[in-house]
Image: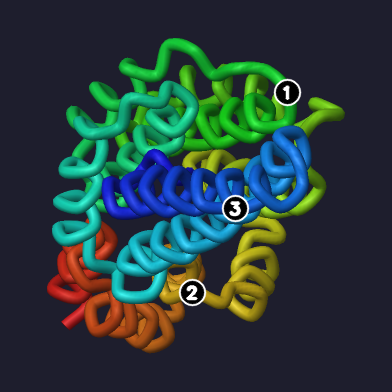
Amino acid sequence: MIRCFRSTKFMYYIISFIGALYIWLKLLWTKNFFVGGLFAFIWMIAIALIMSLFAWIKMNKIINIMRDDCDCEKYLQIYNKLLPDCNDKKMGTLLMLNLSSGYLNAGDSDCAQQTLDRIDKIGKGRLGAMYEAFYYNNLVSYFFLTKDTENVIASMEKLKLALNNKKLNRVYRNKLLYLYNEKESLINITNNIYDGAEQLFDDALVREKHMLGKVYAKYTLGIIYLHNNRHSEAMKTFEFVVKNGGDLFYVKLAKEYLEKLI
């Protein structure tokens, strides 16, 4: 994560090197070469942990531009600036996954596809398991956006396999299982099957902490209300989407429904 940002990368190299050199030289005179080297190594590890924490905090602030402010334009600008400077493949994959999420939320299917196509190596281990699950989750969202039902179903099967990976962190698995169930419900809705959909998205609305998820749940509930001829409730949900959705593509769709309902 340190390498995602120039500031944390340079700070780590400078503080780590200067501090380690100072510690090693100081202890070299008072104790011995190996003790100095050991304490210098511990210093470098400590600085790496601190800088990693700082980088994660910085990354979460960027992610919250989308999750809390629903500001796709600003979010995409930041990630498009970060990606060219990232030479670490693992971190580059993370940035591209987040960038593809931004394009999907903005409704830009072409850029979302181009970004997902650039992800050629997911990696192994716990990190690779997480990347794979989020990759297929985004791929499903892409095919929903392009209304390619056949590939939605095919990608859902791959997402299900990724969620069953024993290396996948439980927190990420639970989060993505919620999204998987919601996507299954959306497939049913496209086939005019609405059983259980309202309760599912009502629960999602209660569970969701970020505005992005609330807007998504509200928009889907609006579709469900329309199907059930509950037009006044549908209008309220679409008005919520327009008011709080920033420049998400749901806002455009909600406005179109409102024009028909007025």
User: Element at badge 1?
Assistant: helix
User: Element at badge 3?
Assistant: helix
Q: Which residue is mark 2?
A: 210
Determine crowd level at label 1: few under 14, some 14-19, many 20+ residues with C-alpha closer than 10 A: few
Q: CA distance from mark 3 to mark 2?
A: 50 Å
* The C terminus - image quarter: bottom left
Q: CA distance from mark 1 to mark 3?
A: 40 Å
Task: Looking at the image, tell me whether mark 2 or mark 1 is earlier in sequence order.
Answer: 1
Q: What residue occupies the far front of the structure in this picture?
A: 29
Q: Which residue is mark 3?
A: 26
Mark nearer the viewer, 2 or 1: 1
* Among the 4 quarters of the image, the one containing residue 60: bottom left
Left or right relative to 238: residue 246: left
Q: Are marks 3 and 2 in contact (CB under 8 Å)?
A: no
Where in the figure is residue 167, as x and y percent of width and height? 81, 29
* Among the 4 quarters of the image, the one containing residue 32: top right
Residue type pointed to by label 1: Gly
Determine crowd level at label 2: few under 14, some 14-19, many 20+ residues with C-alpha closer than 10 A: some
Front-most of 153 and 155? 155
Where in the figure is residue 64, as x and y percent of width and height? 39, 68
Q: Which residue is mark 1?
A: 125
